[in-house]
Amino acid sequence: MKLTDLCSFLDTAVPLSFQESYDNSGLQVGVPQKEISSALLSLDITEEVLEEAISTGNDVIITHHPLIFNPLKRITGSSVTERILMKAIEKGIAVYSSHTNLDIFTNGVSRKIAQKLNLKNIKVLSPIKRKLLKLVTYIPEKHFDKVSEALFAAGAGVIGNYDQCGFSIMGTGSFRGNENTRPFVGEKGQIHFEKEIRFETILFSHLKEIVINTLLDTHPYEEVAYDLYQLENENIEVGLGCTGELDDPVSESEFLKFVSSVLDARGLRYSTLAGRKVRKVAICGGSGASLLNDALSSGADAFITADIKYHTFFEAESKILLIDAGHFETEKFTTEILYDLIIKKFPKFALRFSEVNTNPINYL
């Protein structure tokens, strides 16, 4: 298949519109129309990972952390990023990254950790806002089923675990076409009244183009009336971090050992033990200290994240067990998420997990 087929799928499956404003997810290097047959999955792209891809004959490297994150003013090989970029281009290896959009994605980084910890009742910790649109359109009665079903098939109408969600009400529409029109019903130059159904549904902003194109393609009118509204609603299925519950409460010490074992985290940093049991757990893979207040508000007994600053541990104030399990350790399962997504869509596409440990931190 072509590189653009893989990129288009990932751009939509893990929507690029979900990424934070500072991020640079998506295709970093590569010619979209190039034929590809295999990809290497890695948390990071290093020179060692690139050499691995070259030696194993992979056409693409798919990572969580972007190769190009900060702006480049020149490419001379004076930095690691520049050297990787130059060699990837020379060897014809494409690089694709799925970063903060994979953090926010419904089945993303934090939820994967929750699954590894066997947590139940998993919910989003900090839902995203301003990513939902409401579509309102007017459909002639006899064409209602055809148009609404097409919009649902395009991805509209999904709310949490429910799909095909919409609202409709019967009314009468009016219009008059001039001499340049070819009206579906009625006559040129004469006002026409038609029984129509006002239809409302909801969609994610990244589906805007495909949903509107579907509406225009399936609606019988020459000119289709529709409105789009941006919603302030939180989407409880999409956002940063998550919470979940253990089957049975355990002591803080037992929980720390459990986390260390599951994540293979050999250098846990944690706040003062308060002698309470741990049942509800908040998680944010990677740098998630900014969600501490969300974790506290959720009623979690413990919060697992990474890159916690010294003074942030004071903010826990024995109200929550704050655990820094390491950036690499809390994000290393991203390759599994990407593997599952890609292999389900392209079952014959060859995928390989990198054998390079890219963790730049060592422990004594």
Image (spheres, rainbow, N blue to C red):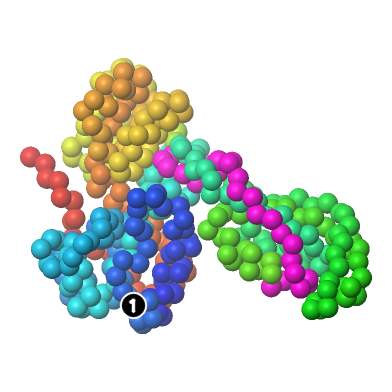
On-image quarter of the N terminus: bottom left
Whether residue 326 is in magenta: the answer is no
**Residue for point 43% across, 48% down:** 104
Q: Is residue 268 above or below residue 7?
A: above
In the depicted view, which residue is nearer to us: 338 or 215? Answer: 215
Residue 360 placed where, x, y %? 15, 50
**Residue for point 58% across, 41% down:** 232
Query: Circle 1 sits on which residue?
Result: 31
Q: Is residue 336 above or below residue 236?
A: below
**Residue for point 21% across, 35% down:** 268
**Res. 289 in view:** yes
Q: Residues within 10 Å of mark 1 (few under 14, many from 20)?
A: some
Residue 187 placed where, x, y %? 90, 75
Q: Is residue 177 above or below residue 249?
A: below
Label 1 sits on a secondary structure element that is loop
In the depicted view, which residue is nearer to us: 42 or 117? Answer: 42
Residue 212 placed where, x, y %? 64, 64
Whether residue 233 is in magenta: the answer is yes
Residue 148 placed where, x, y %? 73, 62
Residue lying at the far left of the rendered structure: 364
User: What is the span of residues highlighted in magenta in the rendered image?
Assistant: 217-242
Toward which corner of the image does residue 61 lie, by quadrant?
Answer: bottom left
On-image quarter of the C terminus: top left
Q: Is residue 338 above or below residue 345?
A: above
**Residue for point 25% across, 34% down:** 308
In the depicted view, which residue is nearer to us: 198 or 224? Answer: 224
From the viewer's perspective, tell me whether residue 51 is left or right of residue 115.
left
Q: Amino acid at mark 1?
A: Val
**Res. 58 in view:** no
Toward which corner of the image does residue 288 lie, by quadrant?
Answer: top left
From the viewer's perspective, tell me whether residue 291 is left or right of residue 203.
left
